[in-house]
Image (cartoon, rainbow, N blue to C red):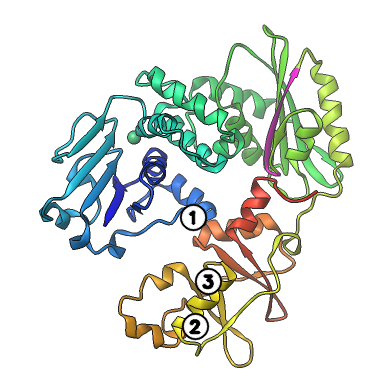
Amino acid sequence: MKIATTHRGSDFDALASLVAATVVYPGVRPVLPNSINANLKAFLSIHKDLFDFYSPKDIHFDQVRSLVVVDTHSWNRLEGLESIKENPDLEIIAWDHHLEGDMDLTEAHIKDTGSATTLLVQEIKRQDKLITPIQATLFLMGIYEDTGNLSFPSTTSDDAYAAGYLLEKKADLNILTTFLRQAYGKKQKDILFDMIQNANRMEIDGFSVSVLKMDVEGRVQNLAMVLQMYREIVNLDAAFGIFKDVERDKCMVIGRSDVDELNVGLIMRSMGGGGHPGAGSALLKATNPDVIEEMIIELIKGNQHSSVMLRDIMSYPVVTVDEDTPVEEVTMILREMGCTGVPVVDKDDNLVGVISRRDFKKIRKSRQMEAPIKAFMSRDVVTISHTKSAIEAAKLMIKYDIGRLPVMEDNKIVGIITRSDAMMYFYDLLPE
Ligand SMILES: [Mn+2]
């Protein structure tokens, strides 16, 4: 068995490197440590289904013949893998940007780039492997996090070339800023202070909105994050910033919204930019900020159709299984449906549990395949009412780290919302 793993307290560079390793080594089992940082937790609670991670406890260590380690090559930074050290003829391949490490390597790809992801992206490029835009986004997050958006002194030209390659492969910068908490320095602090002092609040169609106009000198990083902080502090439904770069005579327009009904992506697209329901931006050349402000207000007024309710994105009808169905039969049903989990009901159709891919990993012996599914299902089922919104569903998925939410009406399941439904919403892939 060939496994890939990374360091404890995984960050985006670690996760991105791990996923990149599965591209470079098809068939390798990616083992994600249980301890991961908070940004990563939020990202995975939405995206987990895209990546088939194993937990260290799912692995029979004595069967591991080949180990790929990424973003570390020190035994003490791995989680729960000490015992495989003793495996005879263990092959160890490392991809790492830390020069120090105590593992006895069969194959070393070690170079002091700004991120470990960079090294794997170079390999993916060299082999001309296919990657999806979502993988490209994740890889870029890995590079950006470890290089402070290519600004840390540790950044090398390799990192920047790799970032360029990922943008070519359609990495999505809006998603990236949603999940990466970025540097907040003096410049950002001054701008935030300015914003709060000049705070203006208007009511447009029942939304509390603020449109700020500011001149900025040179490039200021993370304006989007500052705007987001402003929106949170002043407690607005949505905030828009029009940042005029006086030297270049351009306006950067950024929007952040916390309510479903006010779709920032739609507004930014109308101005030639792009984005998602909660976050977007546009770059306008030689435009008067007052005119842009008027445009934004008009667009918000015209924005009356973008409320996305659960019934618009949920999947239905819902296949359920009876709690006494044998495990084996459930796996067949899942395979036929092509999905990874299913709600479990009792004789009277009441929801009593959910079975998911993670629960199946508890099964170790073949005779357990004949046991009723209720023996393995999760009983604490988080559900959501059909009257709630897509953002509320996504928040629950993040909070409870679950990929499937039954949608309930009068105690019966009327639909199910999955991570991929939520992703369709976040990436704005819904049919218009
Ligand atoms: Mn790293």
The residue furthest top is 247
State left or right for residue 403 relative to residue 239.
left
Amino acid at pointer 2 = Glu
Residue 31 visible? no
Q: Is residue 403 magenta?
A: no
Distance of mark 2 from mark 3, alpha carbons?
A: 10 Å
Asked whether the beta carbons under mark 1 and mark 2 sit within 8 Å of each other, the answer is: no
Query: Which of the pair 215/302 is nearer the observer?
Result: 302
Q: Work out whether mark 1 precedes mark 2 in sequence or the reverse, and give the earlier one.
A: 1
The quadrant of the picture occupied by the N terminus is: bottom left
- Give residue 311's position: percent from left, percent from top: 75, 64
Q: Which residue is mark 3?
A: 335
Q: Is residue 416 above or below residue 258?
A: below
Residue 412 locus on image (x, y percent): 68, 81
Relative depth, front residue between 163 and 235:
163
Where residue 119 appears, as percent x and y from the top left, is 35, 30
Question: Which label sits on residue 329?
Answer: 2
Q: CA distance from mark 1 to mark 2?
A: 25 Å
- State which tag comes first along the sequence, 3 or 1: 1
Looking at the rendered structure, the kind of residue marked 3 is Arg
Vertical position of residue 288 compared to residue 390: above or below: above
Q: Are marks 2 and 3 in contact (CB under 8 Å)?
A: no
| Residue 115 image offset from top left, x and y in percent | 36, 30
Image depth: mark 3 or mark 1 in front: 3
Residue topped by disc 1: 48
Q: Mark 2 falls on what kind of element? A: helix
Q: Mainly helix, strand or loop, the magenta region?
A: strand
User: In the rendered structure, which segment of residues is drawn in magenta?
Assistant: 277-284
The numbered dot on residue 189 is none
Q: Nearer the viewer, residue 385 or 419?
A: 419
Position of residue 87 relative to residue 153, above or below, is: below
Quadrant in which residue 349 is drawn: bottom right
